[in-house]
Image: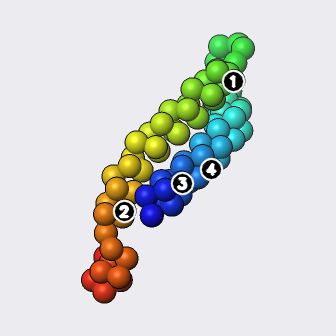
Amino acid sequence: IFKLIWMETLIICTLGGIFGSVIAIFGGNLIELLVRKVMPYAPGGRLLLITPDLLVYSFLGVIIVGIISGLYPAFKAASMRPIEVIRSGE
C-alpha cells in the first residue's frame, strides 16, 4: 500500500511538472507579446527568459516536494487495515 500511494504521488507530480513546464514556455511567450502590445516602450530583448536550467531546477523541485508530501499519506494508508477502512468509510 505504501509503495502504491507513493508511486501515485510521484506520477501526479511528474505529470504536473511536465504540464507546468509546457505552460511556462508557451505562456511566457504569450505574456511577453501582451506586455509589448500594452507597453510600446518596453525594453528590447526578451522580457521573460525561461532557460533549460530553470526548467530542470523547477522540475526537480516539484519532484522533491512531491516525494516529501507523499510520505505522510503513504505511511497513514500503510498503517490501516483495508477492511476497517472500508467499514468506517474513511
- Residue at 54% x, 54% y is 7
> Type of residue at label 4?
Leu
- 89, 19: nearer the viewer: 89
Residue 8 appears in the picture as rendered: yes
Give me the C-alpha separation between circle 3 and circle 4: 12 Å
Q: Earlier in the sequence, mark 3 or mark 2?
A: 3
Give me the C-alpha separation between circle 1 and circle 2: 38 Å
- 22, 43: nearer the viewer: 22
Q: Earlier in the sequence, mark 3 or mark 4?
A: 3
> Type of residue at label 3?
Met
- Dividing the picture into quarters, in which one does residue 42 lie? top right
- Residue at 47% x, 44% y is 66
Question: Do labels 1 and 3 touch, CB within 8 Å?
Answer: no
> Type of residue at label 1?
Pro
SS at circle 2: helix
User: Which residue position is annotated with label 4?
Assistant: 15
- Residue at 46% x, 43% y is 67
- Residue at 34% x, 56% y is 75
SS at circle 4: helix
Q: Earlier in the sequence, mark 1 or mark 4?
A: 4
> Type of residue at label 2?
Ala
Q: Earlier in the sequence, mark 1 or mark 3?
A: 3
Q: Earlier in the sequence, mark 1 or mark 2?
A: 1
Q: Callout 2: 10 Å neighbours few (<14), some, many (20+)? A: some
User: Which residue position is annotated with label 2?
Assistant: 78
Mark 2 vs mark 4, foreground winner is: 2
User: Which residue position is annotated with label 1?
Assistant: 52
